[in-house]
């Protein structure tokens, strides 16, 4: 029975090539888009779930208001000082790490509320060129310059 259905389908596709091509292309694009939307949703739902206490992570979103009081723009990139001040106000610890380099770690280290630096990626990348011991020493010096300065 299925053999006959496949024969009829193949014959119809050969007879109506343009129509069949458009239908198969649309079906393929629909499946691909559905798959990409599913993968995107899975990524959004698993954001920061690898942390041990992921249920205790918070994100600060700053919203701008226009003259009428309606929210005109929202941004999740908050200044480091704002995050540190809010953490201190609520009794939270502040860990800094994403995007820290030798150039900007001194400024972040100058923020008194920061208790931990996650700087491993940049040190490892730098150690490829100058060696691990020297890379760690340079990063430690940059952090101490920020704390002291």
Image (spheres, rainbow, N blue to C red):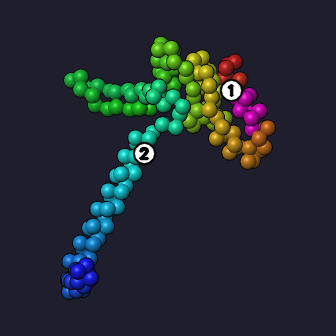
Image quarter hosting the C terminus? top right
Question: Residue 147, can we see it?
Answer: yes
The answer to if 139 sits in the magenta stretch is yes
Callouts 2 and 1 close, C-beta under 8 Å: no
Say which residue label 2 marks: 43
Q: Secondary structure at mark 2?
A: helix
| Residue located 31% across and 64% down the image | 29
Q: Which residues are magenta?
A: 135-143
Tell me the chief SS of the magenta region. Answer: helix
Q: Secondary structure at mark 1?
A: helix
| Residue located 78% across and 43% down the image | 131
Say which residue label 1 marks: 143
- The answer to whether 35 is drawn above or below residue 20 in the figure is above
Res 99 quadrant in image: top right
Instruction: Give the mark, 2 or 1, whose residue is nearer the N terminus.
Output: 2
Q: Residues within 10 Å of mark 1 (few under 14, many from 20)?
A: many
Find residue 24 and report its horizontal and vertical position in percent. Answer: 27, 72
Judging depth in this view, the residue of 131 and 115 nearest the camera is 115
């Amino acid at each position: 029975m299925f053999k006959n259905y496949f024969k009829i389908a193949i014959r119809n596709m050969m007879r109506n090539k343009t129509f069949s091509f458009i239908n198969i292309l649309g079906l393929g694009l629909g499946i691909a888009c559905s798959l990409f939307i599913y993968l995107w949703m899975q990524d959004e739902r698993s954001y920061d779930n690898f942390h041990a206490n992921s249920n205790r992570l918070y994100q600060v979103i700053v919203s701008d208001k226009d003259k009428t009081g309606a929210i005109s723009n929202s941004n999740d990139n908050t200044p480091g000082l704002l995050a540190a001040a809010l953490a201190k106000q609520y009794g939270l610890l502040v860990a800094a790490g994403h995007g820290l380099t030798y150039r900007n770690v001194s400024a972040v280290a100058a923020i008194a509320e920061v208790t931990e630096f996650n700087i491993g990626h940049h040190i490892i990348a730098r150690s490829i060129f100058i060696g691990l011991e020297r890379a760690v020493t340079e990063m430690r010096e940059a952090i101490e310059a920020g704390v002291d300065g």
